[in-house]
Amino acid sequence: MKFDTIIIGGGLSGLVSGIECARAGQRTAIVSAGQSALHFWSGSFELLGHADGKAVIADPLSHIQSLPERHPYRVIGADRLRSLLGRVPSILGDAGLKVSGSLDANHLRLTPLGFMKPAWLTLNDYVALDADAPMPWKKVALVNIYSYLDFYPRFLAAGLEKKGVECHMATVNIPQLDILRRSTTEMRATNMSRFLTDEAVDDLAFKINEVATGCDAVIMPAILGIFSDEPVERLRRAVKCPVWFIPTTPASVPGVRCQLSLRDLFIRLGGEFLPGDTVKRGEISDGRLHRLYTVNLGDMPLEADNFVISTGSFFGHGLIADMEHIYEPALGLDLNVSEGRTAWYDKDFYAPQPYMTFGVVTDDDFHPSWHGRTVSNLYATGALLAGFNALKEGSGAGITLATALHAASRITGA
Amino acid sequence: MTLQQQNISDNNFESCIKCTICTVYCPVTAVNPDYPGPKQAGPDGERYRLKKPLFYDEALKYCLNCKRCEVACPNDVRIGDIIQSARIKYAKSRPSLRDTMLANTDFVGSMASTFAPLVNFTLGLRPVKYLMDATMGIDEHRTFPKYSSTRFETWYRRKAADTQAKFDRQVAYFHGCYVNYNFPQLGRDFIKVFNAIGIGVQLLGKEKCCGVAKIANRCIKEATRDAELNLRSIREAVGNGLDVMLTSSTCCFTIRDEYPHLLHLDNADVRDHISLAMRTLYRLVDEGKAKLVFRKDFHKRVAYHVPCHMEKLGWGIYSSTLMKMIPGLDFVHLDPHCCGIAGTYGFKKEYYDYSQGIGRPLFDQILESKVDSVATDCETCKWQIEMSTGVPVENPISLIAQALDVEATMKANGVTVPPVAD
């Protein structure tokens, strides 16, 4: 089966490069081995949250010079980063996801444990505060759902009270959710969101209004709007003060929403999404990748002019570690892995871990190499790449999106 | 072998990282909170059941074995297999008379097709439906598929067999119960298309029901016996150089994957020779070994529903790509949703409302899309969608057959064997 471009990996990176290729009129396919890490999404994308051991607020792009030389941001360069990433809000908007944020300054997002962390883009219904501005509320209601265990108001309150915000903790219930308590394990954000539509939203709003009197805002777990904005908008209309959401443990409602919205946009643009399939091997010769063999398609390979590999790091199985080796399982690409298991990690759990920076070695255009030779029609993007520590830098989403858009722009010539 | 590799069971439940993504995509969880969800029913529950079988939860019966949990799982855990294996191993109740009857599609089919006009008439009567509901628990709202008075095998022997022998290239056909007893036209459409590109179609020496209904209703001894017979026939055909074609995605999935995973029958020697007709047709067209010429007067707006087991096979792209090749076919994509019937599940009174609730988003999208027909590769999806939307449902190979310019296709492929007379 022949395509113009085939993308291995159906997470944020694969979907965004797929969308851009399909939009340019390319016959594009995405091979996705199970659902992606987007299901763990917080509702915010980070660009560069920390540099030189300090939180970055103003002008994050000016800090990329302090990153290691082979860091993906430095390879792309600040000017091109600005132009690539500038497209992200409109791509998300096309998928129906409304975000706020700027490349010129980070804002602060409120984490589920009550910390403020620098972020670049945040979904409109999630807490995003200007770093220099005073807290916008004097008193907030932290509203949980009765018997829901994945929301921690006391942590939030501890964080907010440090900033001088008075917190009123309350728990509400509506009978429409009683049904979920019939099974002890199923009181989950995504399950609740299926039942929180139409009149159930009005009933929930009524209960929230009862406990939020005298509060400037309601902060509650993200349990609405898994398939559309409608329930969220309905709730915000009915609650008497502004409502803000906090992401929950996975699968997160904003994460599922983002995954499905981007996938649907890709398919609307004519893309072929192959769910639940895994690339077993590829045929590489003369510095080009010719075809891929997958578990489901068996002896009928996928061929394309260009390929993108966006399979993630260890968590996404883009990298596999066994007791002796770390390898890239789809194509066997070259990695920057240190020799010997003990060199993979630091015994201080909180120290920067070497394995976090392991990944696929590429040239300056993000072409990976295979047996020491560059593969010129293949691009590697996102968490699979070597040379950065997304956790310490707060840079994962920015790298994912920038490298995905870089690959798409090279492939489409846009 | 490393320590980590030795720590994984056959059904790999240890690979579960408890992310709960499977539960998000479970169609049963969405409508039935009594179901513990695939993570709890599958890998989580398995840990307990391995300690003590008394941890088995009867609510696992709500799983309809769509395998959408497996398609969604980032860690390739065989969640659906774990749940079905647990039902087979631990469920205490014996299959009821109703379940046994629903499971024995070939026995019931052979009886019903013998008296087809009477059976079709009777099964359509309100009092009969009411009686079946009251006495057997087959929901009175369910429309039964019509039985055919001439079985496909009979038609084939009388009308088609002689012609098939004249082709140089041959494939074998596992037609399944539905084609044989209910809808021989599907088998005839398949033969029409393959004959037009110069390929003859042979029946297997013997075939029984693929076993999907028996597995779902836990008639495992009978399912295994049938499966062994089917595998013998398939091995014989493959030994004679024939690949085995199917026109039902569920039969195909069952024989390829459920035989080894649930019945523990090794089919590795023949598995790659078992394929859906649409996949093989795509391969022939793609490799330039067959040409399809379509009629200019064919016009149809068609929505394609990828059946759950087709989604699991990963082969929906073959059907959709071939249908998109038909110039007069206006293709409409449908979101991935289970239709809710899951073979015999949707016939059962106690599941009927869940079955309809699961399919609701799909039915709504079909009704909104204003299509002439729905295409799908599974017969039970067809029953459910036709009953619930009133929109006719056709197998993709039937659409190819309708749109095909047979004469021009034969000419393009250098075929001189005259087509089987209708």
Image (cartoon, coloured by chain):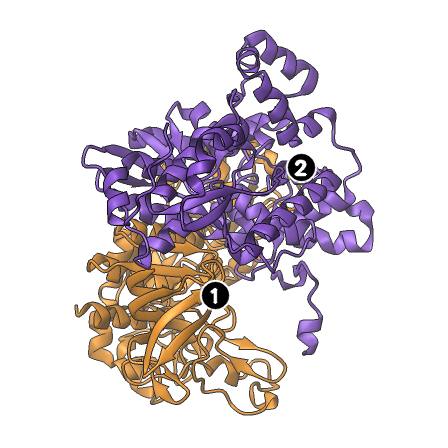
Q: Which mark is residue A329?
A: none
Amino acid at dot 1? Phe
Q: Nearer the viewer, residue B319 or B314?
A: B319
Is A168 left, or right, of B186 in this rendering?
right
Residues packed near mark 1 inside 10 Å, few (<14), some (14 to 19) or many (20 plus):
some
Residues packed near mark 2 inside 10 Å, few (<14), some (14 to 19) or many (20 plus):
many
Q: Which chain is orange?
A: A
Instruction: Point out residue B357 in the picture as x, y percentages from the top left corner.
Output: 50, 30
Q: Which mark is residue A115?
A: 1
- Colour of chain B as rendered: purple
Q: Is residue A149 visible?
A: no
Instruction: Point out residue B198 in the picture as x, y percentages from the top left corner.
Output: 35, 47
State which chain disc 1 sits on.
A
Q: Which mark is residue B214?
A: 2
The vertical placement of A229 against B349, above or below, is below
Image quarter of residue A237: top left
Q: Residue at x 69, y 24 (%)?
A: B98
Q: Which-is-in-front pick, marks 2 and 1?
A: 2
The vertical placement of B160 against A218, above or below, is above
Is A115 left, or right, of A400 in this rendering?
right
